[in-house]
Image (cartoon, helix red, strand yellow):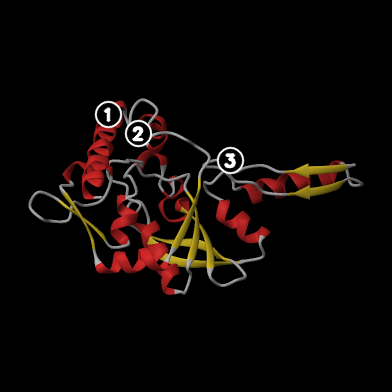
Amino acid sequence: MKILVAPDSFKNCMGADTICSVIRKAFSETMPDAEIIGIPLADGGEGTAVNLTSALHGKLKYYAVHGPDGAIVNASAGILPDGKTAVMDLASASGIELIPREKLNPMIMSSRGSGELICKLADDGITHIIIGLGGTATVDGGTGLLQACGLEFKDEHGNPSGFGGASLMKIQSIKESEDFKKLRRAIKITVLSDVRNPLTGKNGAAPVFGPQKGASPEMVDLLDKALLHFAEKMKNAG
């Protein structure tokens, strides 16, 4: 008998590779004559980069960046055999699993570290980055990531608008720095996502994903309005 074990991760519990090991061990003990194959899966969230890197015979590399709450974390990215392509998850630097559940708060959590990871990969000579989008602790519209890459968001007084979902309402102007322009020219980005939600509205980012990131109903309403404000500013800037 051949048995294929192909789980996704159990969020906030075990990674897909650990689950594979546990299930394979259980089958081996009860069905010693069976051929048991383990293939960890992921849906664009946590574990995607690790699984792709392993399947494509790349190597993981770790970088110190800011986590969603500002603390330093060791985020991983997979460097593929061509030496020019990397695979990363937003969740590695900005993931929900990095924050204790009782401290989740998308009003202040930022994707800054994911942008720092992109910059560090570019500094290492990477020219193509494949990014899994799921599993973050943030509802900041990617502004933290963009700020880390050099896009400037300013408030009405010309000061940086800050980090986190609540800061989106402060944005009044958007400007590309020279560093951002240089990075944009140097890096090709491919995103991996399994959802089609719009940015705002009843099926938007805040109502659908905000609660799992710690947003109360009041926060969801504020975040949805903040994302709409951000979208309007981005449209006018473009």
> Are the residues tagged 3 and 2 within 8 Å (C-beta)?
no
Sequence-wise first label, 2 or 1: 2
Instruction: Give coordinates of residue 104: x percent, y percent.
Output: 36, 41
In the rendered image, the vertical position of residue 189 relative to residue 46, given as above or below: below
Q: How far apart are marks 3 and 2 (CA)?
A: 23 Å
Q: Mark 3 points at which residue?
A: 10
* Amino acid residing under circle 3: Phe
Sequence-wise first label, 3 or 2: 3
Secondary structure at numbered mark 1: helix
Q: Mark 2 points at which residue?
A: 206
Instruction: Give coordinates of residue 128: x percent, y percent.
Output: 49, 64
What residue is at 43 percent from the left and 65 percent from the top? 187
Secondary structure at numbered mark 2: helix
Q: Name the residue under label 1.
A: 221
> Are the residues tagged 1 and 3 within 8 Å (C-beta)?
no
Q: How crowded is mark 2: few (under 14 residues within 10 Å), some or many (20 or more)?
A: many
> Are the residues tagged 2 and 1 within 8 Å (C-beta)?
yes
What residue is at 26 percent from the left and 68 percent from the top? 178
